[in-house]
Every structure is written in structure tokens, then in C-alpha cells.
Amino acid sequence: MAEAAKTQTSFGGRWAFGVVALALLFVLMPFLFWNATWFGRPLNDTQISTALADRAHPRNIQHALTQLELRIEAGDPSVRKWYPQIVQLAGYPVEEIRVTDAWVMGQDNSSDDFHQSLLKLLGDTNPMVQRNAALSLVRFKDDSGHAQIVAMLKPSELSSPFEGKLFTRLKPGDVVNTGTMVAHVESSVGKREVRSNIPGTLDRWLAANESNVTAGQPILSLSPSESMVWEALRALYLIGTPGDLPVVAHFVRGVDGMSPQIAQQAQATMKAINTRNQGT
């Protein structure tokens, strides 16, 4: 009897320990994931230099770039020692790095190296790199990215990167983020994912579900996301031309699903464009 009680107590103790350990695991794992992916975690100089050179882990590079952006905004002159590496990353093969890099270079409009690198990124194959470069150039009082900025206010078409049978995954009205899987294309090599390279809201499918599509064929139309509209309107406040007024006017009365601030910014942008036009 005593032996049975001893065994039961021992089992109960191990069970209690297991529950506590499991509870700690549920707390610890999200923290570890957050700590590994949160770009706000401060890095010292050595860590930044190491991360920028870490070609095996692009997220470490993004983390370092984000920290450099904060230092530039804070007016830290020591950050200039990394400027050559920032410029070099404009040619990095991973698109997410170029997207971040284009934004970071816009934080210091006194750097001619940044200016020239951003001009080249206007021709990047990734539209988000082009957009960030265009927005950053506005800080240099350079309107070379005007066309890309206006395009941010208009619907965009996403083309299939593959040939085969299309299997749609989303429906009109669904929100699409950069990297969202919107469909599969099935062919003799199997099913391959189609992901969006820009954010927005799915407006309509341009190709029917289970229809055959070719590589490069437009398959869906995306309405612009609120964040892209906001940034474009703010940029056109500074560099907009009379020819932009019709597309800006679309947002003046408000758009379903977008905050009132968008309409307010559109009104301010139209006023700024008209004032500039009257002064010329």
C-alpha cells in the first residue's frame, strides 16, 4: 500500500513538472520567434557589420538595414561607415533586401551615392523596389519616379509566371499582402505557387478558374492598398502635376474600405498641385 502511494506521488510530481514545462514552452517559443523576427531589437556596431555580411541569412541583413535606418533618422554620423555596403546591397539577389535597401537610402538625401543608386533601382524587376526607390527619390527633390508613384494609385495586374492550368485561391474583395499566395498553376512539372509581389485588394480575376494560362498572361487585377495610396498621395503633394489630378480626385470623396485620412490627403494633394500650377 505504501509502495503504491509512493508510485502515485512520483507520477503526480512528474506530471506536474511536465505541465509546467509545457506551459513555459508555449510562452518561450513565441518569444524566441518574435525575438528572431523583430527588427526593432537593437544591434551594436559589431552585430550590424556581421549581419550585413551574412549572405546565408537575408533576414539578418534586413534587421541590420532597419537598425541603420533608425540611426540615420536619429542623425548618427557614425552610420556613414556602412554607406558603401548599403549601396552594394541595391544589387542583392533577394528582392526583400532590395525593397528594404531602397527605403533606407531615402533617409539621407545628402548622399549622392544613395541618389544615384536609387535612380538605378527605378528599373528593378520588382515593383516594390521600384516604388520604394521612387518614394525615396522624392526626398532628394527628384521626381524621376513620378510614373511609378502615379501607378501606385491605379489597379495593377498580376501575371502568371508559369504555363499550365490555373487554380484560383482567393475571391474578389480579399486583401492581398506582398507574398500572399493567390493561386496555383498545374502543369507536367506539378503544382506551382503564384504569389503577389505587391499589396492590394483582389478586384477581379482576368482568367477563369481551371483555365489554361500562359507564362506572362495577366490573371488578376488588384486595387491599390491603403498604405500604397497614402504614400503616393503624400509624394504627389510635393511632385504632382496637373495631369495627376484625375487619378487623385478618385480618392477625394473617400473609397470603401479606406480610412477618412486618405480622402483628406487627396484633398490636400489636389490643392498643392493646383497652387503650384497657378504659380507657374
Image (cartoon, helix red, strand yellow):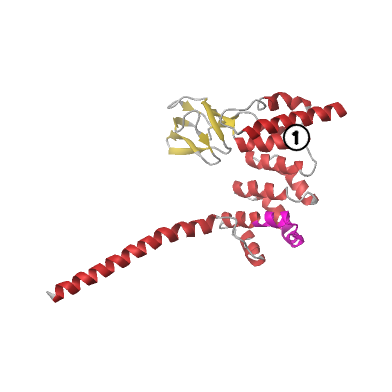
Q: Nearer the viewer, residue 68 or 4?
A: 4
Question: How far from the left and from the top, in percent, is residue 114?
Answer: 75, 50
Q: Nearer the viewer, residue 42 or 206?
A: 42
Q: Is residue 80 magenta?
A: yes
Which image quadrant for residue 20?
bottom left
Question: Dot 1 surroundings within 10 Å: few (below 14), some, or many (20 or more)?
Answer: many
Which element type, helix, strand or loop, lies under badge 1?
Answer: helix
The vertical placement of 24 against 233, above or below, is below
* Quarter of the picture holding the C terminus: top right
Q: Which residues are magenta?
A: 67-84
Which residue is the extreme one toward the left?
Answer: 1
Q: Which residue is denoted by mark 1 in the rendering?
A: 237
* Quarter of the picture holding the N terminus: bottom left
> What is the three-letter code of the residue carrying label 1?
Tyr
Question: How far from the left and from the top, in percent, is residue 266?
Answer: 70, 30
Which residue is the extreme one toward the right?
Answer: 280
Q: Residue at x 43, y 59 (%)?
A: 27
Which image quadrant for residue 210?
top left
Q: Residue at x 22, y 71 (%)?
A: 9
The vertical placement of 128 against 68, above or below, is above
Q: Residue at x 70, y 27 (%)?
A: 248
Q: Is residue 61 magenta?
A: no
